[in-house]
Amino acid sequence: MNPSILSVKDVHVEFRVNQTKAWPWSAPGIVRAVNGVSFDLQPGKTLGIVGESGCGKSTLIRAIAGLAPMTGGTVHLDGQPIDYGSKSRLQDLRRQLQMIFQDPIASLNPRMTIREIVAEPLIYFRPDLSSIDRTNAARDMLDRVGIADHQFNRFPHEFSGGQCQRIGIARALVAKPRVLLCDEPVSALDVSIQAQVINLLKDLQSELSLSLIFVAHDLGVVRHISDDILVMYLGGMMETAPAGRLIEAPHHPYSQALLSAVPVPDPRAKSTPQVLEGDLPSPLEQQQGCLFQSRCPKRFDACKTTRPSLEATPDGKSACLLAGS
């Protein structure tokens, strides 16, 4: 196996918050948004991170990019540890790790033309380039994502959501990063546009030798672009495996529930979604035992007291007490 381009080890992200209905002198609550996540991203591959809203997947990739403070763990890029406290190292990190955000319109400056938006990163990452060179680089990247040349001097509000996401992709790629962090980039788009954006990302990945981390709450979307999939719940890792294996035979009950909720386009197929009981527990609460035990249809007594670690399954790992069975 090739050396990992990005190695994430035991990352924790915690936030202190003032609890409602508490006394003024009460200690603040602690939200454990990310709780001990580890993975390795191989060059040219895509890791899909999936889970329902509030599981910590977006916080995880923001922490990797240096946009949210980590309270524990390490991140290595090309085998070198990332020093988030060093301004020069962080700038180099941001050039190599770029993000695409969930809301395509809100992520673009409404006062700038798309030419200025896409060329702007080069001012910081490539100060050696002239204004003409930056403009040409922006023009080339916009052409790659399917934005016509005559639209070059328009503003973001003149484009559709799908087009704005293409502009956001162009902005992220103009500095030629090696890793692209995609924070639910298609969740705000129509289904047909989602397919177009995913196909565009796959084409660009091949052309530019990119490694991707693709975050989504829909396992049906993630399956089409990912080589490996990581399933998260309440900040923790539930299961990780190659995409094909996890889709065909998910081991963890939470992964099974997510997969059962994926719509099946064949009307003759008999598929009954597995409805999970209850709501996602509050991240402020200290969870005893398995993180998923309060909603798991396969729970038994030991699940209430024993926190399972990631155990090997065929071609993957699962944080379930049934992993060895």
Image (tube, rainbow, N blue to C red):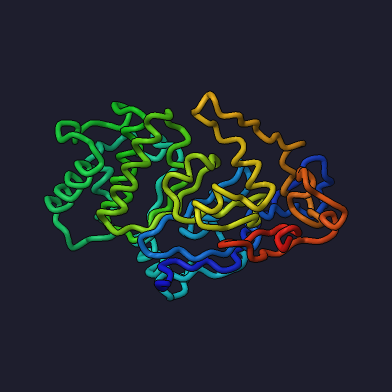
Q: Is residue 145 left or right of residue 243?
A: left
Between 319 and 173, the one nearer to me in the picture: 319
Residue 322 position, x and y percent, is 74, 58
Give the number of marks. Answer: 0
Residue under the point 63% across and 44% down: 54
Which residue lies most toward the front here?
Answer: 268
Q: In x, y percent, where is residue 198?
A: 37, 41
The residue lying furthest to the left in this view is 132
User: Where's residue 64, x and y in %?
Assistant: 49, 60
User: Which of the 4 quarters of the picture holds residue 2?
Assistant: bottom left
- From the viewer's perspective, tell me whether residue 208 is left or right of residue 59: left
Looking at this view, name the residue that lies furthest to the right: 301
Relative image position of residue 319 (x, y in whole percent) = 69, 59
Residue drawn at (22%, 47%) of the image: 141
Q: Give the residue displayed 70% in from the left and 34% down from the top.
A: 275
Residue 1: name its quadrant.
Answer: bottom left
Q: Residue at x 61, y 50 (%)?
A: 250
